[in-house]
Amino acid sequence: MIEASIDAATWVTVIKTDSITFSDGISAVLHNGRYTRSQFDSLVSFFHETTHFWHSVSTNFLHEYSCSYLHESLYALSQIRMLNSNIQYISHYFENSSSLLKSPLNYPIQSIDIIEGSAVFNSYRICVFEPSHNDFLRFLHDNYAKLPKYNKAYYYAKDFLEEATFELFCPLCYVALQYPDPGKYFSEMILKIHSFKLNNGKIDFVLIQKDPLAFILNIMNISADDHLLPFLQPYFKKGNVSRHPILRPFIEYILNISQTNSTNIRWVEDMFARPYYHIRNNFSTLPKIVMENLFFGFGGQTTAKFIITNDFNKFKIIPPIRVHVNPKDAYETRYGQIEYGNQVSILSQGLTNEDDEYNLKICNTTVLLGILQAIQINDRDNIELLCPHNECPIYKTKLCIKYYFFPQNNYRDCEFSDLMRAQGLNLLIK
């Protein structure tokens, strides 16, 4: 797989593929055209990380995790400023967010298994033209055989639900992530559906393909009026707002879409529960009013034509910043020979793509979280930087691990140290 990562506090996505290769790939993969293996892998990686973002704005658990991680990071930075010295070990500042990823030991599935398992499954179903249960099992074996947090939840569900897992898995993860202990609730749902299957002889595949959420909610005796989106009922009715400044615009926007009527709430919930279903159907499954709110420039076009024209890049609810790693040398494309002027390309996207102040805040916060990441690592020699300036004295500290605005030519033109001074952290680089 192409390496990719996403910051769980600021939601900046880094993909080790250049932007042109990626853009061509997203069009080819989504519309069943010709694409290279590297393009396919980059899309799988991108949608894996994007699934985490979708869950951060649509599930209680991952939203709370992101809030906790962000606020604990900012608190740790404040402690560093107050002490005016380097803190070699600050892991105890992150005990709350770290503990969220664990479930009681007597449950076979942990929260992290739900988070990663659903991301693997969703990215597979978006990117594979003819997906199937057996093919996905091969996909897991070929790519994640020695990485249990990516395959454990699906294998567990399969042992009880067999091929029905293929239609129910992602919605089950989505429902589980609405609860404080996703691993525990996921296990309970699997066992309850298994009991239903034993008592009734079978599961209606037509129903679970059409509306898996309705099936799950019925099995779990959850009223259809108890909407899953955590910020709708009763969160915003109390006048609350998300305590996450980066996610807040997305959550409030989703609220506005959903408030139009209760039917739209269900459509939006289903889109977050199984994004692959709607993406692979060119979003033709969604009502026009939902489409108009989810995409820039929808303008009454037919759904299929609109999606093919815009290649998904006009989708509003996607991670706000995408960083692409570019090749060092010129290479041939269908546009001719391409040579990038920098090691990385930084692209804003989605709902906030034209808000320069917001995007700068995201990038600067990401830099600060990178500093925290670096100072927790004793042996920094193995940290790989995207910056090419290994002669820079700050390069050796690796504190700039998430600083993407480095100059192409002379490291002395870099503004990282200015940012450190502005944040009161300049003593870390002395």
Image (tube, rainbow, N blue to C red):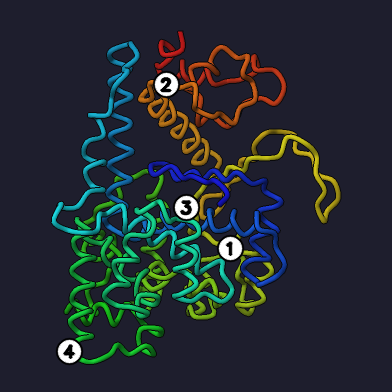
Mark 4 or 3: in front is: 4
Helix, strand or loop for disc 4: helix
Measure the C-alpha gap from mark 3 to mark 2. Answer: 27 Å
Please, what is the three-letter code of the amino acid marked with disc 2? Asp
Q: Give residue 23's position: percent from left, percent from top.
A: 67, 56
Locate the C terminus and report the quarter of the image it occupies. Answer: top left
Helix, strand or loop for disc 3: helix
Decide: few, some or many residues near mark 3? Use Cα within 10 Å; few <14, some 14-19, many ≥20: many
Q: Are marks 4 and 3 in contact (CB under 8 Å)?
A: no
Mark 1 or 2: in front is: 2
Label disc, if present, on residue 49 of the rendered structure: 3
Q: Are marks 4 and 1 in contact (CB under 8 Å)?
A: no
Measure the C-alpha gap from mark 4 to mark 2. Answer: 56 Å
Label whose residue precedes the other's in the sequence (3 or 2): 3
Please, what is the three-letter code of the amino acid marked with disc 4? Asn
Measure the C-alpha gap from mark 4 to mark 1. Answer: 48 Å
Looking at the image, residue 377 sits to the left or right of residue 104; the answer is right
